[in-house]
Amino acid sequence: MINPHGNQARGGDVVVDADLNQPGMALTVIANSMEAGGGTSAGIAHPVGSQLPIKRRSDGTAFVEIRNLAPSAVIVAVNHP
Amino acid sequence: MPTPAAQTLLSQPVPRNLTDIALPRRVKFHSSPGDWRDEVLYFLLVDRFSDGREASRPLLDRNRRTAFRPHGHHRQPWRWDRWAESGAHRWQGGTLKGVESKLGYLHDLGITALWLSPVFKQRGHLNTFHGYGIQHFLDVDPRFGTRNDLVALVDAAHARGMRIILDIIFNHSGFNWVYPGGVKEPVYKPFPDRYPFGSWLGRSGEEIGNHVDEHEAGIWPAEMQAIDSYTRAGVGNLGGGSLDDPNAEHKRTDFFTLRDFSLSAPGVLDHLAACYRYWIAMTDCDGFRIDTLKHVSYEEGRNFCGAIKEFSANLGKTNFLLVGEVAGGDFAQDRYLDVLGRNLDAALDIGGMRMTLQNVAKGLAPPQTYFDGFDAGNAEMGSHRNLGQRHVSILDDHDHVFGHKIRFSSEAASEEQVVAGVALQLFTLGIPCIYYGTEQSFAGPEESEQRFLPGWKGGDHADRYLREAMFGPEHPRASGLVGLTATNGLDLTLPGFGPFGTAGAHCFDPNFHVYRRIATLAAIRQRFPVLRVGDHSCCKDQGSSSPGPGFSAMRRRCA
């Protein structure tokens, strides 16, 4: 996930594969560019090691919630870390 | 340790004839990677990257740039126009030894393969620091170093698990001769017309007639001195004619003063292939980036690439990378890849996709526009984007064939935004290629100065602003032959063309936050195969939690 905005935080619901990501599962954040530059994880959204629970809409769509991703931040999350 | 073949070839003088060369058979060479999608490429201009003497200069303090704009000749205040002149018209002094000294810096960044700008011998009296004007196809330019230096660089890279890709040209030679009357760039003559040959140029650029005998004059090896090796059609439109026409204007024209080869003439293609076989055998390199591929016909391209593929495979390099520079846009890239088939592995994404990549990374275009380029059903961008192996992603390069000739960082909202751009390269389909200086967010001089600079964002030598000297020389080499000398070879009247409009300070900073962030992301890419080879799609943004445009989310999947 990438926030291309240069100076505002962004977020949204990201659709994931409903077959590979069942309810009760979670994606694990394995990289957050805002930490990688030598910064700390304090106060940043979705730090490394945090979980993104799989959620479902009534139509069966699976998604994860991304909120307040810092300007120009990049995070990578996987379902099998 | 250089291969036995390299040792044998290096023990012999630089060949003057292709018949002087005995290439090795059945000896062990460094094998190819199984899949080039596993690699992260880094493109550097040898003249502009490192001279290996950074320890003699300070690291640039980005917060005190004015301190690195020294007084000039005779105590004149810093002059931006002189800095710009240095960048456009002078060799800066980078060397192969310098590149070798930075392998650790690059390795720690996560780079696994270096694409070097052409290292072959240029005309001594000309300032073709980019390397695309070859005078001797079997020698290394002395300003870059020696054949030994090149072999040592490849050997050192292999020892670190890294690979080297050489940049080669078989469409044209350097400015080695003139048309009758000393004319440099006559008006184009359509097929089948051509001009008579004029005269070879001597070591200082003087006309010497039809006979070449010294190393610095005319062109070498001797086989290339046959005047029918050249199209001799003059200078036409580089985009003129149909892509499919082997005699189209864009295929026959000289590249300004760079002389177009007549590849259909007997022996010419064989001679060029023999030259590059020599470099594979000597250096043990891992691939070629092929310059100006659009300007040769499909058949010539297929035959040349096939010859290289066959030779390298016979040395055990069964996946020797051939990546083409096909200018003219995404359709042209796709066309050459389709027609050349398995003889050409990949094309550089230097067309519309590079600009789309930039725009998506800056939030100026929806992410879907980039992913549309990988859509097999999208005729505009071409079906090759289905296949990551055929696609080398480019955020910045030394030319910017499309768009303004300024780096991504120059108009980025922040230094962090560069990370977003590189992340798109690292985690989408294809082989990512990072341009030197990106990891240091090279952005050119201060915005307040930019509009006063010659050629900024277009015009005369605009591409100079894509080609800063990362090692921050105090002064460039002197122009022409004087610059070839080991001592007193500097032009003290000009400042070096250092990054951010400076001179005398280098920019190799492994603690810079952008470097560290890219290194972290590259390591993640290396750790998870799915991020290199998995299926790939754009995730829909199901409603942003904040006003305005949303963000980019992509998915890579292995079932």
Image: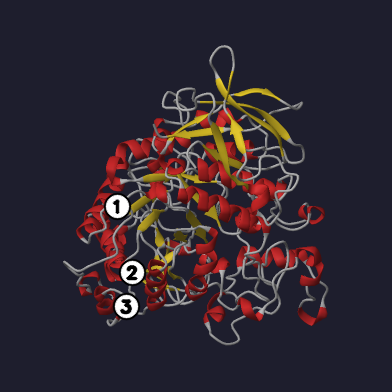
Q: In the rendering, at what x and y percent does residue A34 appear?
A: 68, 48
Q: Please, is residue B557 above or below residue B62 in the view?
A: above
Closer to us: B390 or B468: B390
Which amino acid does the dot numbered 3 rest on? Val
Left or right, residue B82 beside residue B526: right
Q: Is circle 3 on the same chain as circle 1?
A: yes
> In the figure, is residue B258 to the left or right of B247?
right
Q: Residue furthest top?
A: A59
Q: Amino acid at mark 1?
A: Asn
Q: Chain of mark 1?
A: B
Q: Nearer the viewer, mark 2 or mark 1?
A: 1
Q: Position of residue B412 (x, y in %)?
A: 71, 46
Q: Nearer the viewer, residue B160 or B101?
A: B160
- Residue drawn where x is 53% and y is 53% of the image: B434
* Residue pointed to by mark 3: B14
Location of mark 1 (residue): B319
Q: Earlier in the sequence, mark 2 or mark 3?
A: 3
Q: Is residue B547 above or below residue B244?
A: above
The residue that appears at 28% across and 79% down in the rendered structure is: B7
Local crowd at mark 2 within 10 Å, few (<14), some, or many (≥20)?
Answer: many
Q: Is there a contact, CB below 8 Å, between mark 3 and mark 1?
A: no
Label 2 is placed on what type of residue? Thr
Query: The C terminus of chain B lies in which quarter of the figure?
Result: top left
- Percent across and percent down for residue B240 are 46, 39
Q: Which residue of the protein is positioned furthest toward the bottom in this rendering? A: B487
Residue B283: which numbered mark, if any? Answer: 2
Q: CA distance from mark 3 to mark 1?
A: 28 Å
Q: Chain of mark 2?
A: B
In the picture shown, does residue B165 fall above or below A2? below
* Closer-to-camera residue (A76/B393): A76
